[in-house]
Each structure stands twice: as structure tokens, then as C-alpha cells.
């Protein structure tokens, strides 16, 4: 028996199809049994022959029945089977959402907004127009659009003193992607990984994920203590020389040269993560380690997250000129994760000169925030709160004169609608992290609201310091 | 001695800085030596004190010198160092470019163009406007924009009979990214990987890259021969049930149920790659394996490459409802490679109903090409050329009645400006591939040019068959 509803949205042949499937799966229609002849079904339900034939042919395509020429459709043999839940449990475990705080000193956010600028909109329109003219669309080069790689090389030459050709550049889908890809490219014999301590948490997470054992190297006011690197052959040294993350030190030239000669001697690779090099507020950006390297041992990581927007998800790798990329090309890249439209848009944005303007605009704005927060801290707390990382970047590390657990300090602020961030996240050896150090990011707070944020922070800090005095 | 060029583009303090760096690195200025006093330098070169101070402070920031209060700037000790090549070799090994062919039957290209449609442009504009209104920009959810995941669930419910919640969906940066991510998510104890033979080359490359050993399972006119799966605990079965790649079979319901019960019994996972399910030209799209699964063992891979554009680089994974995603959330995802702008644009495109219209449009166009090529082959070659994979998708596999090596067949066509593709690429066991089978893709060839392509193909085929008769 079939139920045909002529007024339903579901086409009639699908109604037939669905019900017959059910009967076959439930065993109501048995293996080898012949389906009712199409003509008989047509008459019984007043249907057109086409409708019934469509239903039977669909069943045949999916393998429920098989037609025998001149004889009809017969039910195929199906194995036993537990029926799919008709209403599967859709209450999948939700991502635990953190309570939001009104005064959030989040690291990694960015304003001013990129998408509202006429420059970006123009580049986006030009990119859309250019793609519109393509006869057919296909998966573009796995290493990224050649034009964008060229524009990046030009920019790096002018701003970071780097000589690299587009063939050395790989466009990626963000920092995490860059590191993952790099770990695939590097020969498997490179197994020792030296990491700054404290250092970038997403980087160490990615290294750990890829199965590397991390050797933490202490950081002081000159960045990574290069002296502490043990002379292992074929190691990888991950370093943020322009602005150590999160402590903010600049790696001095002596340590840079020492690092390069270490890499040369041990046949190691240095990963230079140049995540916010353009953001210096007193001096010029510090020249890249890559630009000092004559031995092809520095791999450079760049990104647009701190200049354009973190949600664009475009980063890039610059490989040393001597890197053997042949096997990589053939076997490892496979495809790019970066949308052609976004890549082309950024290329046009760089080539038009707007990118440089944007970098300056972002730097000037961040400098104002940086200076305001620094003055605020100095004027109100002087030596009582030690500040790390001033002079560049998008955050400070604060050492608070309190004797409390880090979790308790953060909860104290959270109860006052303020979010600061735990320094512990940046340590491989969690026990080395000082309890009273927290991270304060400012790049996402609009300048107009900074005073309000600092007012609230002052109230909380005063209360906290009072409590501890 | 310094050379100061007042007419140069390089700021004067940078000229000083650059020359002093050179002198320090070369040893001309020795460790511990005091730089000329700022006042003396000012007088000697007629410079302002600020200019000289800027240069000295930059040198200090980078660690070349150190200031002693009231005494001046002293050269720091630097280790020996091989100078960076001033003109590094920029002739990096170029990617070997294949000769382009005018008549390219490439797989994976797509027309009609998405970017020229008013629907896409409207969605892109709306997405840009929405992002413009954000107070600050940040790295969005690692699993992808919630709204897009929701829109995908709605679409999959309506078109693929799938019940999944947005929390089960991960947005990725394309097919390769989906598989790589999946292999990270799956517990390390899942080490056996069954793969269709022939099967999808990028998928097997990704599995191999991740260190899996592949067990090839033969494919016949009913797709993967599920009978051949050996009962290993905790294995992974990669399968393309809606349209086996590249041979084009539909996995019949009996094999589907058998596969699910295999997975249930052996605690295995099935990866259902549903890469072109919407492209059926006779019957309705075949319901997904995921929709039959009551035991939470099917992981579904979807993509916009065959409906929107391959260069958007957006694919997605749908995890079974019972999948433990907790550890994943915390440790593995880290960040999404997909641009927020593109994600939001696709969300709006789906929600406005334009996505469904587009899918129909693409299907209708491809159906015309499919039918034209099929008629062409049948009319001209009848049984002499066996055609696999008709009825759906974007390509055919042809078995040519010639006794030649595959390379020679492809070169024969290439010499006539025609590119066909080697079936060998899709085999794990290369020796199992028949020499006389080639892949012909048609989705990127405009309908208006198809006749021209087929005319050229006919000339070459006639010549080839003549030669072999």
C-alpha cells in the first residue's frame, strides 16, 4: 500500500520511491520479489507511467531493485541493518563559550576596520572584476597566486630588506597553517625543536601536534638566550627576533649573528616569526634575521593579521633561496587553502600602494594606544607595576605586585568585567611562569573607548593592590 | 668616514645607520670603541642633533652599540659572521610549467563563472558591509563561522537528507585541508586505511603524507567491493559512494548497508567524500551514506568547488553526532584557514536561495556538455571506445582500443594540442592501471566551444584508431 498525496510539496515519484525503500529495508518487500508492474501501479493510483518509471529507475540507480528486460523490477538482496535515527540527537556538545567581558584586553584583535575603507573595497571590486573575466575557474597554484607572491617580495624588499623571489614564497591560510606546512616540508630528520620560553602558544601547540618534542630556551631582556642552544645537528629553532612574543625583547645583533652561525654549524633551520615587525613606536622596524642570512638557514614567516585583518586568514612563508623545493612541489603542497579572490584583492591592495598607507595608519593608531596605556601605568603605579614589551607590538606584559595565584588574579578582574590574559599559556614548563604576570592586549580597543577601559582597570587595580598591601 | 647624500631618497639617519653597521660588522669599528660624539658628528657633516641621535638610537635598539649615560655610545662585541649576499641568487628553481594545450580536457575546472553573477556580487557586498560594522576584527571561530555552518546544515537537510547540527560542522580550506584535519582529529589508533582503487589521487597523497599505509580495495561497476575489506579493528574506509572517483559507479544500497555494518562491527570510521553529489543527469542525487548511518561512523566531506568555484577554497566536514569533539576543540583546531569575508559571503548566498539556483544552473549546463560528449562518442565510435562514468559528474573515463603505453597515448594527443589525463595517477598500484584508459574532463569547457573541442578530438581519435587497426 502506498500513500500518495497530490497536494504535498514532495514530488509524487519521490513519495513512491521513499515508501518503497522503507518497505524493502524493513523486509516487507522481500529479496527477489517483483515490484508491482508499472502499468498496474499507474492504474491503481491514477498516475502517469513516467512518474512510476522515474520512481523505479531511481530505486534501481540506488541499488534497491534491479530491472530485467521485459520482465520488471526485482528487489535486491540487502544485508540486515539498523535503521538510521529519524531524529538524531542534534544537541551536540556545544563549544563552551567563555563569559564575555565588557573591558576585554584581548590579544590579536585589530581596529581600525579594514572592510569599511574605500581602498579595500576598490581592490576587492577590481579582483572580482578580474576573476569575472576568466573563461573557466579552477584551483589556482598550490603555492598561491604568483602575482601576490611577487607583490609580497617587492614589499619585503622595501620594508624588511629581504631579497627573495616569488618562487621562494608560499601563501598559506594563517600562522597555524604556515607552521603545519613547514613541518611537512622539512625533512623528517629535523626532530629537535628549540622554542622560546615563554613563547607563542599557537606555535608550540602546532609543534606538539605534529609530534615534535620542544626544548624550551629561556628568554631575557635580549630575547632568546642563544647561548643555551645545545649543539644538536639538524635542529629547528623557532624565534621571534623583531619583537619576542610575549615578552617584547628585540634580539640584539650579536645574538642574531650567533644564531645564524649556530644554524650553519649544526645544519639547522631557524624559523623567524616576524608577526608584528612593522609595529615599532620609537625606532624603525628592526631588520629581519632573514636579511642577515648568507647560509640559507632562515625561514621567514609573515602575515597580514596585524596590518590588514586577522580574519582574512592570509599568511606566508619565505623559504631560503637554497631550499630544495622540488619534492615539495610534487608531493606536499597539493593545494592552497587561500581563496583566489582574497589573494588577488590583497595583491591589488599592495600594488596600489594602499598597503603601505594602511600599515602606517595602523602603526600610528596603535602608537597612540601604546603611549596612553604606558603613561597611565607609569603615572598611577610607577615602579609598582613592571611593564614588559613597551616600544612595539599590540600588547604589554604586566607584573603585578601581588601574591595570588594567576587564576585568582584573572577571576578578580573578571568579576569587575575586565579580561586580562594568563601568561601561563605561553610557557611549556607551566611551573616556570610567575603567577603575578598577565598579558594586556590593546589593538582591538577603539581609541575613543580606551579611557573608559583604563578607568575601569584603575578601579580594579587599586582595589587589588590595596588588598595586597 | 661617512658618505652623506642629501639628495638621496634614503633618510639621512638611515644612511648613517647603514654605514656604521657595515663598519661594525667588518671590524673597522672595534668592540668597545666609542662612536664619535653626536655633537662632533653634527658639526662635521652639518647635521641636526636629532638626525644623529636617531641613527645612534636605532643602532642601540638593534644591539650594535650600547649607550653609557653621560659618556656616549660604545660598540658591542659581535661574533664572526659571513656577510649576507648582497645580490642573492634570485633565479630560484622555477616550477616546471607544463606546456598548455588549446584543447584541454582538464578535470576540476568550472564554468559558468561565479564572480560575474549579480547574486554573488550582492552576497559579497552584503558580507563586506556586515564586516565593516564590526568594532574590531579578530580571528573568528576555528571551526568556521557559526552562521555558515548553520546554512550548510539547512542545505544538507534539504538536499542530502542529512540531520546534523552546526556543532558537527567544520569549515576548511578545501578538500586536502579537510582530509589533513580529519587525520589529526582521528585517534592515532586508527592506522589502517582502505582506499578505493582506482581512487582520488589528492586524497591518497594526503593519506600517504600523513604517514598512513593504504590498502587498495578494487572498484567494479558497483563502486568499492566492500566484500574485500578485511576485518581490522579501528580502520578508516575512504569512499566516494555517490559517484565513485574516477570510475563513476554508484555504490548500491546493499554495499552501503554492508559498509556501515562493517564499520559498526570493527569500530571503524567511513569517510564519505561527497564531492559532486548534486551532479546527476538522469535520476535524483543519490542519498548520502551519512543519512543511512545510525551508528555515528560516517564522516561526511562536502565542498563548494563543484557548485560555486574551485578557487574559493571552501570545503567542510560533517562529523557524526557522537564524535568526541572536546579534545579537538581544545588542542587541534587552533584556527580556521577560511577568510571570514568568503565564509560570510557564502552564508548569505545560501540563505538567499541563490545557492540552490546556482546548483541547478551548473547541473543543467553540465548535463548538456555530458550529453553532447556522450552522443559524440556513441555516434562516432560506438562500442569501440568504452565510456565509464556517464550519468553524473564532470568527467568520463575512456577505454581506447589501442595497444600503446599511456604516456605515448597522451603525447599523441598533446602533439595535436589536446590534453587528456592519465588514469595511472589514480592508482596506488600503478601496474594495475590499464595503459589504454584516459580521463576526459569537461566542466571547464564553455558550451560554445565544445563542438570545436570535439572536432579536434575526432581528428586525433580517428588518426589514433587508424594507426592501431
Image (cartoon, coloured by chain):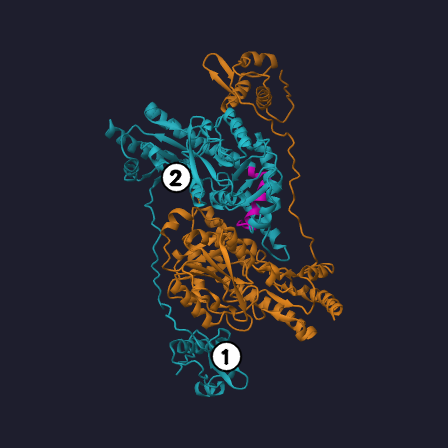
Chain colours: A orange, B cyan
Determine the main secondary structure of the stretch shown in magenta.
Answer: helix
Q: Position of residue A75 (x, y in %)?
A: 52, 17
Q: Position of residue A215 (x, y in %)?
A: 50, 60
Q: How many marks?
A: 2
Q: Is residue A68 above or below residue B317?
A: above
Q: Chain of mark 1?
A: B
Q: Residues within 10 Å of mark 2 (few under 14, many from 20)?
A: many
Compare residues A129 and B203 and report the one nearer the observer. Answer: B203
Splitting the image into 4 quarters, where does residue A294 fall? bottom left
Q: Residue at x 47, y 39 (%)?
A: B112
Disc nearer the start of the sequence (1/2): 1
CA gap, disc 1 to disc 2?
A: 62 Å
Q: Toward the viewer: A106 or B468?
A: A106
Instruction: Answer whether labels 1 and 2 touch (C-beta < 8 Å).
Output: no
Q: What's the magenta region? A: B336-355
Mark nearer the viewer, 1 or 2: 1
Disc 1 and disc 2 on one polypeptide chain: yes
Q: Is residue A232 above or below residue B231?
A: below
Residue toward you, A283 or A262: A262
Answer yes or no: is residue B44 visible: yes
- Is residue A135 one of those drawn in magenta? no
Q: Which residue is mark 1?
A: B66
Relative placement, left or right, of A419 versus A115 is right
Asked whether residue B350 is drawn in magenta, I would say yes
| Helix, strand or loop status at disc 1 | strand
Q: Which mark is residue B252?
A: none
| Picture layout, residue A370 above or below residue B464 | below
Residue at image mark 2: B106
Q: Residue at x 34, y 23 (%)?
A: B383
Which element carries disc 2, helix, strand or loop? Answer: loop
Q: Is residue A287 above or below residue A201?
A: below
A33 to the left or right of B136: left
Amino acid at each position: 500500500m502506498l500513500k500518495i498525496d497530490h497536494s504535498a510539496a514532495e514530488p509524487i515519484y519521490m513519495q513512491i520511491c521513499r515508501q518503497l525503500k522503507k518497505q524493502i529495508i524493513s523486509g516487507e518487500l522481500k529479496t527477489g520479489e517483483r515490484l508491482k508492474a508499472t502499468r498496474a501501479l499507474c492504474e491503481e493510483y491514477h498516475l502517469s507511467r513516467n512518474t512510476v518509471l522515474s520512481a523505479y529507475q531511481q530505486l534501481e540507480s540506488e541499488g534497491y531493485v534491479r530491472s530485467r528486460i521485459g520482465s520488471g523490477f526485482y528487489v535486491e538482496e540487502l544485508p540486515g541493518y539498523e535503521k538510521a535515527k529519524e531524529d538524531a540527537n542534534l544537541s551536540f556538545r556545544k563549544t563552551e563559550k567563555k563569559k564575555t567581558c565588557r573591558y576585554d584586553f584581548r590579544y590579536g584583535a585589530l581596529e581600525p576596520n579594514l572592510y569599511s575603507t574605500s581602498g579595500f573595497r576598490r581592490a576587492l571590486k577590481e579582483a572580482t572584476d578580474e576573476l569575472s573575466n576568466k573563461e573557466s575557474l579552477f584551483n589556482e597554484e598550490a603555492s598561491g597566486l604568483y602575482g601576490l607572491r611577487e607583490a609580497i617580495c617587492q614589499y619585503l624588499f622595501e620594508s624588511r630588506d629581504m631579497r627573495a623571489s616569488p618562487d621562494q614564497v608560499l601563501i598559506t591560510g594563517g600562522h597555524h597553517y604556515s607552521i603545519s606546512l613547514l613541518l611537512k616540508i622539512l625533512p623528517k630528520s629535523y626532530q629537535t625543536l628549540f622554542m622560546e620560553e615563554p613563547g607563542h602558544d599557537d606555535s608550540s601547540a602546532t609543534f606538539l601536534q605534529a609530534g615534535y618534542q620542544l626544548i624550551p630556551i629561556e628568554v631575557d631582556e635580549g630575547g632568546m638566550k642563544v647561548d643555551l642552544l645545545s649543539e644538536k645537528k639538524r635542529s629547528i629553532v623557532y624565534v621571534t627576533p623583531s619583537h619576542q612574543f610575549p615578552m617584547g625583547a628585540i634580539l640584539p645583533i650579536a645574538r642574531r649573528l650567533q644564531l645564524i652561525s649556530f644554524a650553519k654549524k649544526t645544519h639547522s633551520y631557524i624559523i623567524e616569526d616576524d608577526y608584528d615587525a612593522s609595529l615599532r613606536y620609537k625606532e624603525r622596524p628592526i631588520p629581519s634575521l632573514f636579511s642577515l642570512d648568507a647560509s640559507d638557514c632562515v625561514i621567514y614567516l609573515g602575515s597580514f593579521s596585524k596590518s590588514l585583518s586577522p580574519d582574512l586568514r592570509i599568511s606566508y612563508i619565505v623559504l631560503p633561496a637554497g631550499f630544495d623545493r622540488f619534492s615539495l612541489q610534487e608531493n606536499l603542497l597539493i593545494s592552497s587553502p587561500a581563496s583566489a579572490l582574497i589573494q588577488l584583492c590583497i595583491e591589488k591592495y599592495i600594488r596600489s600602494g594602499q598597503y603601505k598607507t594602511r600599515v602606517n595608519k595602523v602603526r600610528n593608531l596603535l602608537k597612540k594606544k601604546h603611549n596612553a596605556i604606558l603613561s597611565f601605568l607609569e603615572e598611577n603605579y610607577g615602579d609598582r607595576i613592571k611593564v614588559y614589551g613597551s616600544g612595539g607590538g599590540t600588547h604589554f606584559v604586566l607584573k603585578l605586585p601581588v601574591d595570588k595565584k594567576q587564576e585568582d588574579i584573572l577571576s578578580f578582574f573578571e568579576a569587575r568585567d575586565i579580561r586580562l590574559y594568563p601568561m601561563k599559556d605561553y610557557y611549556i614548563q607551566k611551573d616556570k611562569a610567575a603567577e603575578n604576570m598577565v598579558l594586556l592586549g590593546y589593538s582591538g580597543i577603539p581609541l575613543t573607548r580606551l579611557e573608559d577601559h583604563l578607568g575601569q582597570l584603575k578601579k580594579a587595580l587599586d582595589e587589588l593592590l590595596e588588598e595586597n598591601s
